């Protein structure tokens, strides 16, 4: 198969300069503000974005370690297959976050709920639609009983203050 090449459409500006201490999901970073700077050549693609309260950011984990198929996630002492986790060290280091859009200032999206490192390349932006994206689930695997911890734990394994 041919290589797949993506070019960033923008970059994240956030208070997190290194993985250590970064919230591990956007729900753990509800009040964290950031800016998504969309590159000028993609400005037209932002038309009507202000009509949506929550964009989905798809981005490249630019500082992740070598990929591993077996990982030890922050919320568990055991190991799991990488596809049963949201660990960043993946065969294709792609992340997703749903953030709250506060305002649009030209090509700058001011957002809250940023759990992304400063300087992270943004690959795409899509509107979050609860009618399509929020579905009831029957099971959540090894995370059962641990899911409430997501809001409190940071990338370094410690709980937030």
Image: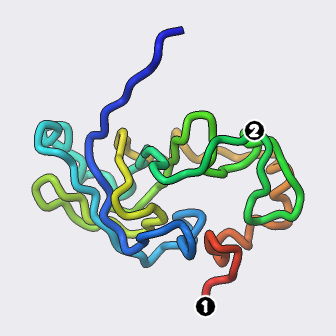
Left or right of residue 118, residue 69 in this image = right
Q: Residues within 10 Å of mark 2 (few under 14, many from 20)?
A: few
Which corner quadrant holds the C terminus? bottom right
Q: Along the line of sight, which residue is nearer the eye, 133 or 60?
A: 60
- Rendered residue at 71%/42% (across/down): 68
- Rendered residue at 66%/51% (across/down): 87
- Work out whether 8 lies above or below 37: above
Hey, which residue is sitting farthest right in the picture? 78
Which corner quadrant holds the N terminus? top right
- Work out whether 83 lies above or below 51: above
Left or right of residue 22, residue 114 in this image = left
First in sequence: mark 1 or mark 2? 2
Q: Which residue is mark 2?
A: 69
> At numbered mark 2, what does the secondary structure look like: helix, strand or loop?
loop
- Rendered residue at 75%/38% (across/down): 69
- Residues at marks 1 and 2, CA–CA distance in whole angstroms: 32 Å
- Rendered residue at 15%/52% (across/down): 107
Q: Which residue is mark 1?
A: 161
Name the image colouring: rainbow
- Work out whether 130 lies above or below 22: above
> At numbered mark 1, what does the secondary structure look like: helix, strand or loop?
loop
- Work out whether 156 lies above or below 73: below
Left or right of residue 90, residue 19 in this image = left
């Amino acid at each position: 198969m041919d290589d797949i090449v993506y070019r960033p459409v923008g970059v994240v500006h956030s208070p997190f300069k290194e993985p250590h201490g970064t919230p591990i999901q956007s729900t753990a970073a509800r009040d964290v503000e950031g800016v998504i700077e969309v590159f000028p050549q993609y400005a037209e693609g932002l038309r009507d974005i202000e009509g949506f309260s929550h964009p989905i950011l798809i981005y490249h984990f630019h500082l992740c370690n070598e990929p591993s198929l077996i990982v030890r996630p922050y919320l568990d002492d055991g190991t799991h297959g990488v596809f049963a986790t949201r660990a960043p060290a993946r065969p294709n280091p792609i992340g997703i976050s749903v953030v709250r859009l506060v305002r649009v200032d030209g090509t700058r999206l001011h957002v809250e709920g940023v759990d992304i490192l400063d300087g992270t390349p943004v690959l795409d932006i899509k509107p979050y639609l609860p009618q399509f994206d929020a579905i009831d689930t029957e099971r959540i695997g090894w995370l059962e009983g641990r899911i409430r911890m997501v809001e409190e734990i940071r990338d370094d394994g410690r709980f937030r203050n």
